Amino acid sequence: MFENLTGRFDAVTQRMSGRGRITDENIQESVREVRKALLEADVALPVVRSFTEEVKKRAEGAEVAKSLTPGQTFIKIVQDELVRVMGETAEPLNLSVQPPAVVLVAGLQGSGKTTSIGKLARYLREREKKHVLVVSCDVYRPAAIDQLSTLAQEVGVEAYPASSEDKPERIAKAAVDHARRHYFDVVLVDTAGRQTVDEGMMKEVQGLHKALKPAETLFVVDAMTGQDAAKTAQAFGDALPLTGVVLTKTDGDARGGAALSVRHVTGAPIKFMGVGEKTEALEPFDPQRVASRILGKGDVVSLVEEVERSVDQEKAQQIEKKLKKGGKGFDLNDLKEQMQQINQLGGLGGVMDKMPGMGKQMDKVKDQLDDSLVRRQVAMIDSMTARERARPDIINGSRKRRIAAGSGVQVQDVNRLLKQFKQMQKMMKQVKKKGGAQRMMQQMMGGGGGPGGGSGLPPGMGG
């Protein structure tokens, strides 16, 4: 996420770090680099202009603190400006109204609107403990109603049974009435999308808004469309009193232009961002944390929160005990458990994106961050007998062929998995001998040329 911006800002910091003090000359040079970085990230021109003017003004008046280098001072100014542009603080949904709270969701076709409603329904049910009803008012797109119904079933919420023969406004009113009578807390209303903004589409969604008087009116936009995202957001912002934005497909957005433009263009805060295809891949948008990620500082707070929600703490403690014993008793069942927990945290890419300093590593290893790799390795372990998982040393040639056939891989893939498992055991012994948990982490992430092989991936995950 935002790899291009991260790389460019890092280069600016490195150049400034070599200077003894901030001068007019190196401010001009650095501001030029920041402007170039923002333009390449497809940030809207008015945002680029105001951003660079503010950074320049603050840098010219900045006094370098004794504990900070010029580079650190400059990047702090850039970070503060990133936070300001994206909205200062996280803004949650305002659902403190008489139930049911209606959330109207609008956006273009293909922006990920219906999928975002499924993700939001799951988020509200699991994290906010809300009783959620979803309803589709998209009577034009084939199977739109069925798609939302399927998503609702997947995330454990109820879908109001709509018909494509009915009128959108009538469907929405009936759904809200049903929610009121059955004590639902929230109703998520999916509206029709079009390939482009058109008058008929806007009139229909304006009519729905007038009829429902929603507590929240959210605009869903594809982050990968860059400046087009800002233009579309402006069109919807002119037609509707937007209360928030949901940025989708941010995991595939290396530039970051939409994240930096949408708030400025619409005046509405970004409330959520989609970070993957799975229904749990939705995060509340926090400008402070996102700015930290853009600048390569990671987002440890979000990672810790995700671990607390997703990881089985009892199993994690059992593995930790084995680590402290130098890997004694650590077997392929434990390795499989670790792989599955990484998947629950959004996959390897999701974990690395939140780790400080890992932004620079992403380009080196992004080809190896395919979640299908993890699935294949889990399939190999599943194809082993209980005895083989507990004692990998007994796996000979014929057993390898059977495991490969059972999991649909090549024998060399099985060899690679076993080799990496041995590397992991070796590292655990080093940790016990030297008390170097940090050393192990560095090796696992490819630092220091240790047993991790420098791939930038944990053992068992490399290609």
Image: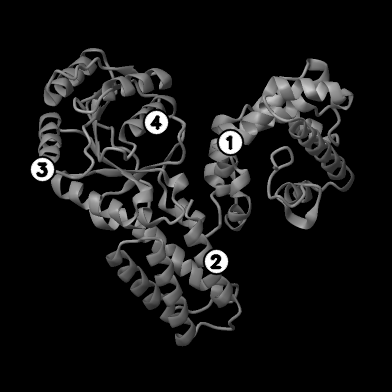
- Give how far apart the Cα atoms at labels 4 and 2 are: 33 Å
Residue type pointed to by label 4: Lys
Instruction: Using residue 211 as the reference point, say whether residue 417 is left or right of it.
Output: right
Q: Residue at x 24, y 49 (%)?
A: 233
Residue situated in front as seen by the camera: 291 or 451: 451
- Residue depth check, mark 1 versus mark 4: number of the one nearer the observer: 1
Residue 391 visible in the shown view: no
**Mark nearer the N terminus (1 vs 4):** 4
The quarter in which the C terminus is drawn is top right
Q: Earlier in the sequence, mark 1 or mark 3?
A: 3
The quarter of the displayed image where residue 196 is located: top left
Viewer-nearest of discs 2 and 3: 3
**Residue under label 2:** 10
**Amino acid at the residue labelled 1:** Asp
The answer to whether 37 is drawn above or below residue 283 in the figure is below
| Residue 20 horizontal side relative to residue 218, left or right | right
Q: Residue drawn at (21%, 13%), measured in percent from left and top? A: 181
Q: Name the kind of residue labelled 2 in the image.
A: Asp
**Mark 4 sits on what residue?**
119
Number of other residues with Cα within 10 Å of mark 3, as a class: few under 14, some 14 to 19, many 20 or more? few
Local packing at callout 2 (Cα closer than 10 Å; few below 14, some 14-19, many 20+) is some
Residue at 45% x, 78% y is 62
Quadrant for residue 100, please give it.
top left
- Using the image, determine if residue 169 lies above or below residue 58: above
Q: Which residue is mark 3?
A: 199
- For label 1, the residue is 371
Answer yes or no: is residue 429 visible. Answer: yes
| 200, 357: nearer the viewer | 200
